[in-house]
Image (cartoon, rainbow, N blue to C red):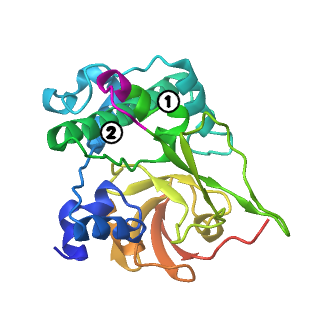
Amino acid sequence: MTDEKFLAESHWYGNWGYPWNYYRDIFHFTHEHGIRMFAINLPRGAVTIVRKKGFDSLATDVRALLPPKVDTTNEEHRKLFRAFFGGEDALHGNMPPEMFEGMFRAQCAWDAAMGWNALQALKKHDDGRAIMVVLIGSGHVAYGLGAERQVRPWFDGRMATVLPVPIADEPCGPLTGKVRASYADFVWGLPPASESEYPTVGIATAEAKADGHYKVIMVMKDSPASAAGFAVGDLLVAMDGERIDDREAMQRRLSTKRWGDDVDYRVLRDGNEVDLAVHLRRSAPK
């Protein structure tokens, strides 16, 4: 199928939201070379249930997407997970203990599901020579505390982790970088990225609507949204003159934007409609 048909039928911008072009080459490479691909994550709603209510509240068919036991007791993993959220994280920094434990359960659920479902696909299709490559975020891989640890009791084969590491190009000298030996089995040096390739507005919204609108729950510091005057509590009404009815359509429209473009929002604030012009400009160097 075409890219557009795939994005529509998979509800890419509803289920994920990040620009398709970040992933497009991977999908096309596997298609052209006849390499199987498998979805290994839990449904978004299931992760929310785990976060709010725990594993016992999952439906039987969803629970089958997880290994028989999900370990949420590892203190090293808990310490690493807490370190992911520094005080500068306006949305998650300094969260209360109950909220943190819910988030940690969700993280363990992601780790366990992705490791477990990759293992099930490998077992089903292994011809004795198969290699399963699992593409997941570094937070699920670092120090072997995530997916690798969760799946290890169920797999006695070989595993290896590869993580990208930013390196610095020193004047008149070799490329340098520092990494702890326990971080991963292999590291891949990359130039440090100062900005994302595709623009972000800099707001986070609640997943469910409030009063028929998506509510802004975070405005990133020094972001285009911050410069435009967005405030926590704003209710999104329209984007570029089109009413915002669902997150997927909003994310899809945003995916067409590039650095240098503008986005016109209308929000509901204290009962009044307010127009905000977001200029997608890279932040000035510090």
Instruction: List the single residue furthest toward the top.
Output: 73
Residue at x-position 49% and y-position 77%: 263
User: Nearer the N terminus, badge 2 or badge 1?
Assistant: 2
The residue range painted magenta reads: 151-159
* Label 1 packing within 10 angstroms: few (<14), some (14-19), many (20+): many
Left or right: residue 128 versus residue 167 is left
As displayed, is residue 210 above or below residue 286? above
Q: Which mark is residue 237?
A: none
Residue 49 within the segment the image draws in magenta: no
Mark 2 surroundings: few (<14), some (14-19) or many (≥20) residues within 10 A:
many
Residue annotated with mark 1: 145
Q: Amino acid at mark 2?
A: Met
In which quadrant is the N terminus drawn?
bottom left
Q: x and y percent of residue 268 in the render? A: 45, 63
Q: At numbered mark 2, what does the secondary structure look like: helix, strand or loop?
A: helix
Label 2 to label 1, Cα distance in Å?
A: 13 Å
- Residue 157: in magenta span: yes
Q: Is residue 1 above or below residue 50?
A: below
> Which percent across, then down, holds residue 143?
55, 33
Q: How many marks?
A: 2
Identify which residue, 118 or 74, lies in the foreground: 118
**Residue 56 placement (x, y as % from top left):** 26, 19
Q: Is residue 47 visible?
A: no
Query: Which residue corresponds to mark 2?
Result: 114
Q: Quadrant of residue 285?
A: bottom right
Q: Quadrant of residue 259?
A: bottom right
